[in-house]
Each structure stands twice: as C-alpha cells, then as structure tokens.
Image (cartoon, rainbow, N blue to C red):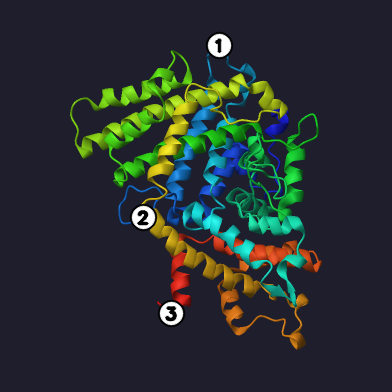
Amino acid sequence: MNWEQLLSTKKLAEDEELPKVFDRFPINAFEKDYAQLVTGAAFRRLQDKTQVFPLDKGDFVRTRLTHSIEVSTVARQLGMMLADDQGQYRKEELAQYREQIPPILMCAALLHDLGNPPFGHFGEALIGEWFRTVLDRIEYKGRPLRSWLTGQMAADLEHFEGNAQALRMVTKARHRRDINLTMPVMATLIKYPTDSLSFDRRDPDIKKHKLGFYTAEAEVFRTIADTLGMRNENGEICRHPLTYLLEAADDIAYATADLEDALNKGLFTLDVFIQYYQSCYRPEDVQEKQPLDYTDRMIRRLLELRGGQSTPERDAAVFRSWLSELRSWFMYTAVYRFVASYDEIMAGTFREDLFYQTNHSETIRILKQIMAEFAYDSVGVLRLEMAAESVVTFLLDKLVHAVLYCDEAYQDRSAGYVPSSVDQKYLFELPRDYQADYDNTRTGEEGMDLYLRILMATDFLSGMTDSFARTLYRQAIGIE
C-alpha cells in the first residue's frame, strides 16, 4: 500500500461545486468531511445513546456522543504524534501527510459508533439474537424468511454488527448526499474487512474477529478498497493503516474514560481498584523493563498521587489525574507499535492490535478486565438490559413484519400478501429517507429485495435514540 493512494480524496458521489469566490479559503477534503458529519442528524443522535451506563440525571455519565468525541481527540492526537515524531524510530515519509492523517482519524473516530443501536452493545447483541430465533419461524409468502435469503444475507442479520451498520450508513451517500465522505475516512472506519460468513472471533488475525460489511455493501466495500489500493500481495483486502490507530484510540477511551464513570457511580472504590489491579499479576513475575514492570510502575504511581489522605472526592480527582497520565502512556505505546510494525502494516500482514508486545499491553488488559468485572454486571446496567430486551425485540418484531409486503411490486392481495392495518401504522413511523434508500437499491430480484427491506427495518431501529425507542415502545403498548 502507498500513502498517495491511501489518502485519495475520491468520494462515492460528486459534490456540488461551490461558487468560485470560496476558492479564497482553501479547506482540505478531510476538514470538509468533518464539517459535514458534525452537522448530520445521525451524529447528533449519539447524545441520547447509551455508552456503557444507563443515561440518568447525573451529568457525568458518558453517552455515545461524548465517547465518540473523546475517541476522536485521542485518534487525532495519535495522527499528530505519528506525523510529528522526532524519535529515533520515526517514519520521515509520514511528516508530509501532517495535514491529511489527523483529520481523517478525527472524522473516522466521530463516526465509529454511528451504527450502534440504542441501549449500548446489548442492543446490538439483541438484534442478532432475535434474527437467529425468527428466520425459520416468520414466513414470507408461505415460506420461512431464511429460504428466501442467501447464506450470507441470513448471517448478516444473525450477526448484526455496529461496525458494518456504520459503513452502511455512510455509504448511502451514493444515493442521497447528506453525508458524502471521502473514501479514506470510510476505509478507516472498516475495522473488519471481512464478511459475515468468514469472520471468526478466534482467528489469530484481528481483522477477522467480526464482520465489517453486509452483502448490501459488498460492492461498494470493494470499490473503496480497490480505489485506495487496500490489498496485500496475495490480493486479500486488508485494513487501511489508519484503522489500527482508530482502534487504539477506541480502546484507550474505553479503558480509561469508562473506568472514571464506574468509579463515579460507586461501582468500586479506589481501594478496591488498587487491590484488584495488583491481584492480576504476581510481584515475583515483575522483571525490570518488561511489560509487567511498567504495569507495576503505574499502580505505584497511583499510590504516590493518592498520598496519605483519602476521601471520596479526593480519590475521584486522583483517579482522574492518574487515568489522564495513563492515557498518554497508552498513546505513546500505540505509536511505538505502529512505527515498529510499519512495514507489516503497510504490507497488509500485521495481525495484532497496537498494544501487542508493548510496555503497557498488560496494563490495558487489566483495565479492560476491571471494567468487565465491576461495570457490566452492575445493577444499573442489568436493569438497562432488562428494559432493552423488551423494547428492542418488540420493535423489531413489529418493524420487520411491517416491511415484508411494503413493496407493491411483490404484493398479492388475493393471497393476503399485503401490509396489515397494524403494519401500516409502523410504516407511517418509518422516515421517508429509509424508503428512498430502498427504492434506490432494489434489484427486482425478490429474495434480495426482501433482504433490503429487512435492512430498512434494522436501519430505522439502529438509528433510534434510547429515548425515542423507549417512547415508541410505550406508546405502542398503551402506556403513553
């Protein structure tokens, strides 16, 4: 791969030309991407979507919007560190792309959670679970839905994935130009250049751990990859190099910022955190200048910052300061790994994340383990998930049934293959843009078009905020 091609400013659709007078104020293509996406409705909706903890009246809990902004800040800084690196391992060729790399990372990071449905990652899992239970049960024209779909189409639905959904949303510009982004931004967004039949969470290659695109976007995915030259010597589509930095930024924000929320919500005290952290390794295994040494140094640094005084307020301030310091070390190690593995990354053969065999590979693993131990099974999160199950499964059932016969070309009134009166009510809720998307992509092949209509239902649901999904559900069952 080469940077000139990887940083192409090509788009899926042509932009309308601005009046010549604006030539006085040159703005690069990636800064224009930023201006487009921050004014888009899909980005604004992230302010009312759960990150990890239920949205409440407190003003400190992070939403998908604040998380995305934090990831964007880290990603942009990683790009700047890479381009401005003055160390002995620096890649001098990257300095000339100082104006391109940081804004691409900033934009991709703001978009990375755009496809996540309401109620956090649990909402994402619920959609896949629901399709796994109904594809053989719900019928279309007397046959189970699964019999109309290819194996890949069915797998797309049964393994609904926010990353693939985000790509689907931003590639709709080829039909509607509300967000018409450059290809490098979209490519950086694709963490997993793998389809739903090929991913394997146990594969040693990280890019194959999840699906990154649906059947509906397979052609445009290949167009982006080929335009930017994202293939290795075997012809296999690989990650855009900047995707590794985006992934690292997401991990850094998740492992630090969400922990701060957990402490503030009282899910653990600083004493419990320190005790658990130290229990994750044995002191006798700590060897000088090995990963565990740096992990141990960080907890000793926390104890130093804390000193002898301890109050909840002081502990919170100390923890915040420590996490900020740790975030800087994580960024340092991510840039180190990118540079150290540069040739493999550019050849499309690097199979790990950017914390692989770095000074803080163990540190970030421990922080993620603490989040799993104390946050995901907390009472607030469990109650959110209980509510989410009712809302998501109810709305999916109603929306999927509503779209089955919404295309007049496939209706048969004599056989009863038309939307019911209840279906009509849910179709009325469906924004016109979603119907326009379907009209622009329908193929005339009944199985494919059925699949596209089902995606229209998941598009609508995944675009909902927590509040809108909850309100629509309550109205539907007569509570409001």
Name the residue that disc number 2 marks: 380
Question: In terms of secondary structure, where does tag 3 sit?
Answer: loop
Residue 159, x across and y down, in percent: 63, 54
Residue 97, x across and y down, in percent: 62, 26
Is residue 98 visible in this depiction of the protein? yes
Number of the front mark, 1 or 3: 3
411 is higher (above) or lower (below) than 215: below
In primary-sequence order, the first of circles 1 and 3 is: 1
Q: Quadrant of the C terminus?
A: bottom left
Is 331 in front, or is 106?
331
Q: Residue at x 33, y 35 (%)?
A: 273
Residue 25, x across and y down, in percent: 57, 37
> For the residue marked with disc 3, what is the amino acid?
Gly
Name the residue that disc number 1 marks: 88
> For the residue marked with disc 2, what is the amino acid?
Gly
Is 92 in front, or is 155?
155
